[in-house]
Amino acid sequence: MESAFEKKISRLADFIFASKKLVVFTGAGISTESGVPDFRGPEGIWTRKAKGLTAETRDWSKAVPNAGHFAIVELQKLNKLKYIISQNVDNLHLKSGINPGILAELHGNITKIRCLHCEFTMDNFDDTSLCPLCGHAMKTSVVNFGQSLPREALNEAVQQSQDCDLFVVVGSSLVVYPAADIPGLAVENGAKLVIINQGPTPLDDAADLKFEERIGLVLPLVIERLKTLMAAGTGG
């Protein structure tokens, strides 16, 4: 007999199998298994600060993708991933093999610089560079608190969310706005919502499925089940 957890794994695999327009939304939680600290988890940056503790610091540039990242890449290889929206700046999605054309990095990327005028983005070879398109100054693409999100990435994220039929949140507490508004757009437009996050989110009650287990456990099992469904040609 399947456990409650196994039933949820099968149900999410069924959702993905049936989906034509899957959007994945990732937050800091997907990268904790790569050694990158999150913000509000048990050892998160803000959690530790609230306890009067120092936040752990590491060189994020040396982090490598984990099982959660590679499971999302598998969705891409299986032609089941329409788009991915990320709040992460650690470059791990691109390192894992995600196609840049289906990725919106709403909070920027530590390895890239962006034009302050036209938002052209490129690898950071020299952070004093001028934009090759319009000649204006280029600065780090990472969005700090109080700064606006890149318009093009945000607009594309909104459009993809409004058009999707399945929206999967992976490792986000959904409390950092305006990015946290985006899953609600998917729900308002009829998409199923799945949340994989260790801790509550404001949209838990709206979710069709909620996982509290580790991302690196959940997603590989879902991919395994999905491949079985695809090989058989039928959903569960």
Image: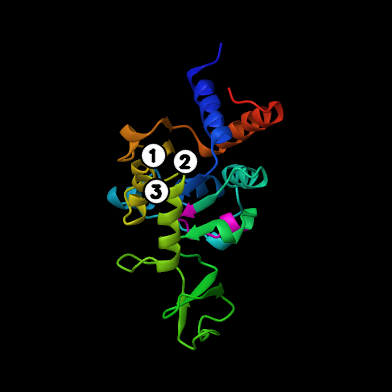
Task: Decide which of tag 3 and tag 1 comes sooner along the chain.
Answer: 3
Which element type, helix, strand or loop, lies under badge 3?
loop
Which residue sits at x=58%, y=22%?
236
Residue 10, compared with residue 164, is above or below; it is above
Magenta span has 179? Answer: no
How many marks on residues?
A: 3
Which numbered disc covers residue 190? Answer: 1
Which residue sits at x=32%, y=39%?
203
Q: Quadrant of residue 226?
A: top right
Tell me if residue 106 can be seen. Answer: no
Q: In the displayed structure, does residue 54 sit left or right of residue 7?
A: left
Q: In the displayed structure, does residue 97 sit left or right of residue 118?
A: right
What type is the residue that disc 1 sits on? Gly
Q: Nearer the viewer, residue 210 or 36?
A: 210
Question: Marks 3 and 1: which is nearer the front?
Answer: 1
Q: Quadrant of residue 223?
A: top right
Which residue sits at x=28%, y=50%?
50
What type is the residue that disc 2 sits on? Asp
**Are the residues tagged 2 and 1 within 8 Å (C-beta)?**
yes
Task: Decide which of tag 2 and tag 1 comes sooner along the chain.
Answer: 2
